[in-house]
Image: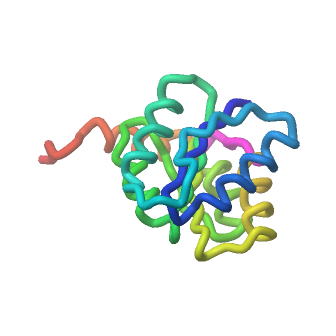
Amino acid sequence: MKYFIGADHAGIDIKAYVKELFEARGHEVVDLGPSTKDRVDYPDFAAKVCESVLANEGSKGILICGSGIGMSMAANKFDGIRAALCHNEYSAKMAREHNDANVICLGERVSGYGMVEAIVDAWNEASFEGGRHEGRVEKINALGKMGSCRA
């Protein structure tokens, strides 16, 4: 599996940790930055990861900031991205199984290393169940196509 990972200055340490975890499990991880703790704007890195996921069918994205909130808000602006902010294994598992999340968002200041490992493992090991969830995911995708043109 190919993963694209990005963070802001508040997510650098967890980004490096998650990248190592995924590479140790045999996955390809493309680090889209940043490489230092110098202040940056999280929407810029959300855009890089989301654009890469959309351009590489079957890939997934990982975004990290201080809380995970800003990254998830920015990522979900992209049509075709279903980003889930996860703080525990259950939410990560459900994000994949029920919502077909193709991007996971994490908060370095919220979750410790052990929890982050459990979250990304749960998300990575789960797969979309389809069935009754397909129509709901199609409706989510349709919302992205509506943009600001609502009746």
**Residue found 79% across the figure and 48% down from its top:** 20
Q: Is residue 146 left or right of residue 3?
A: left
Residue 127 rendering spot, x and y as whole percentages: 72, 42
Where does the magenta region start and end? 125-133
Whether residue 100 is visible, yes or no, is: no
Residue 68 shows in this picture: yes
Q: Quadrant of the N terminus?
A: top right
Q: Is residue 93 magenta?
A: no
Q: Residue at x 67, y 73 (%)?
A: 111
Task: Tell me residue 95's x, y (percent).
Answer: 61, 54
Task: Using the image, determine if residue 62 lies above or below residue 112.
Answer: above
Residue plotted at (65% across, 54% down): 15
- Residue placed most toward the observer, 33 or 104: 33
- Nearest the viewer among 37 and 32 is 37
Tell whether position 128 is magenta.
yes
Nearer-the-camera pick, 34 or 142: 34
Q: What is the quadrant of residue 119 in the picture?
A: bottom right
Question: Where in the figure is residue 60, as x and y percent of width and height?
Answer: 61, 38
Q: Main secondary structure of the magenta part?
A: loop
Q: Quadrant of residue 90?
A: bottom right
